[in-house]
Image (tube, rainbow, N blue to C red):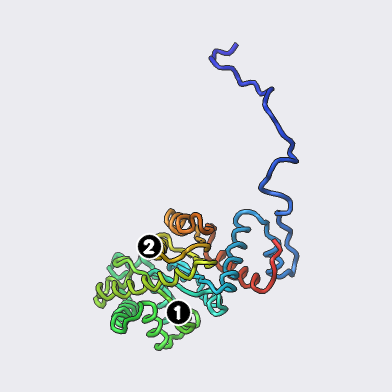
């Protein structure tokens, strides 16, 4: 006999039902199909399972296509790692195809894009230069970007527009792979959002905190105007910014609703190799609660972003059956 006070519960009177009658989340209709050699990307996209991230990827792509057809906003907010992964050509192609209505960068993304445009390389070895006090002190980067902030204030334009105009006029060797140059050439609003003290150019003697603040605040207000165009079928993508852009986006959403402007029926998505608190809360959940749909897909930028871009292009040209 057991020494325990309780006996195992008697399961003989439990109730059951027919499997045929039970609602289920997955059916064979949702399964993947095998890849066939020499197939098109469209065929591969259709072959994916209609489940979880694969389904979400298609839904995000379809939302972008729908937004373009409805003439609604598609805004991309991005961090520096997206630029360092070599993805500017992919995003520039989407811009030229008319799938992007606004581009919002943190300071890191702007710096890396500028250096790529000017000299064709970026991302210094911090460990090697920090000990000597040399980290982030490249003269051209600090001087040019800080000067753009001064120009923005003088001409009463945004930081992104000023930097785009100056960099384009410089005609750098790698302008064809610069998001800043491409946005300026395509007349797509580019906003740059700073947290003073977080970027290398803020350490330079050419940095003017008041001018940097004024320039980036102009861009915040412009970003708010861009976000108004999400209502009624637009899309906001947060690519690789774990803190700054999610916070900026949430404040823009607040401003719009505080002013009594409509902001509903839109899609948000966070694509990153780690899902952080702020993107999940301030992009995927809070802004669309009860009025839209948010997605989070985890994976490397260098794989996810080209996949999404290709899916958008294919969906705009072919009917995806799943």
Side (left or right) of 197 relative to 62 = left
Mark 1 to mark 2: distance in Å?
A: 43 Å
User: In the image, residue 221 lies at what x, y percent?
Assistant: 36, 71
Residue 169 appears in view: yes
Q: Which residue is mark 1?
A: 120
In this picture, is 39 found above or below 48?
below
Q: Give the total of numbered labels.
A: 2
Residue reaching furthest to the front: 260
| Residue 175 screen position, x and y as percent | 47, 83
Q: Decide: marks 1, 2 in contact (CB < 8 A)?
A: no
Reading the image, the residue beneath label 2 is 258
Q: Secondary structure at mark 1?
A: loop
Quadrant location of the C terminus in the rendered image: bottom right
Q: Is residue 72 above or below residue 282?
A: below
Residue 291: x and y in percent read: 51, 58
Graded by Cα atoms within 10 Å as few (under 14), some (14 to 19) or many (20 or more), the crowding at tag 1 reads: some
Q: Residue at x 31, y 84 (%)?
A: 155
Rendering quarter of residue 196: bottom left
């Amino acid at each position: 006999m057991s020494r325990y006070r309780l006996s195992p519960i008697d399961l003989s009177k439990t109730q059951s039902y027919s499997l045929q009658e039970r609602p289920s989340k997955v059916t064979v209709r949702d399964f993947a199909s095998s890849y066939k050699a020499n197939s098109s990307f469209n065929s591969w996209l259709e072959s994916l399972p209609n489940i979880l991230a694969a389904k979400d990827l298609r839904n995000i792509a379809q939302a972008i296509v729908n937004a373009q057809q409805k003439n609604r906003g598609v805004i991309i907010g991005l961090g520096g790692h997206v630029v360092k992964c070599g993805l500017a050509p992919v995003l520039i192609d989407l811009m030229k195809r008319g799938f992007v209505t606004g581009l919002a960068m943190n300071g890191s993304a702007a710096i890396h894009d500028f250096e790529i445009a000017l000299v064709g390389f970026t991302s210094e070895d911090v460990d090697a230069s920090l000990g000597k006090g040399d980290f982030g002190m490249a003269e051209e980067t600090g001087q040019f970007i800080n000067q753009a902030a001064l120009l923005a204030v003088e001409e009463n334009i945004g930081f992104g527009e000023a930097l785009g105009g100056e960099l384009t006029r410089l005609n750098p060797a790698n302008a064809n792979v610069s998001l800043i140059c491409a946005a300026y050439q395509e007349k797509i609003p580019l906003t740059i959002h700073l947290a003073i003290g977080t970027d290398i150019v803020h350490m330079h003697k050419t940095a003017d905190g008041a001018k940097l603040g004024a320039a980036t605040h102009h861009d915040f207000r412009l970003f708010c105007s861009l976000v108004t165009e999400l209502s009624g079928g637009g899309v906001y993508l947060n690519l690789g910014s774990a803190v700054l852009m999610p916070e900026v986006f949430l404040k823009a959403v607040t401003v719009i609703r505080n002013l009594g402007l409509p902001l509903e029926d839109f899609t948000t998505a966070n694509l990153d190799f780690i899902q952080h608190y702020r993107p999940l809360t301030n992009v995927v959940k809070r802004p669309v609660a009860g009025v839209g749909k948010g997605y989070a897909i985890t994976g490397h930028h260098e794989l996810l972003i080209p996949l999404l871009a290709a899916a958008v292009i294919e969906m705009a040209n072919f009917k995806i059956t799943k």
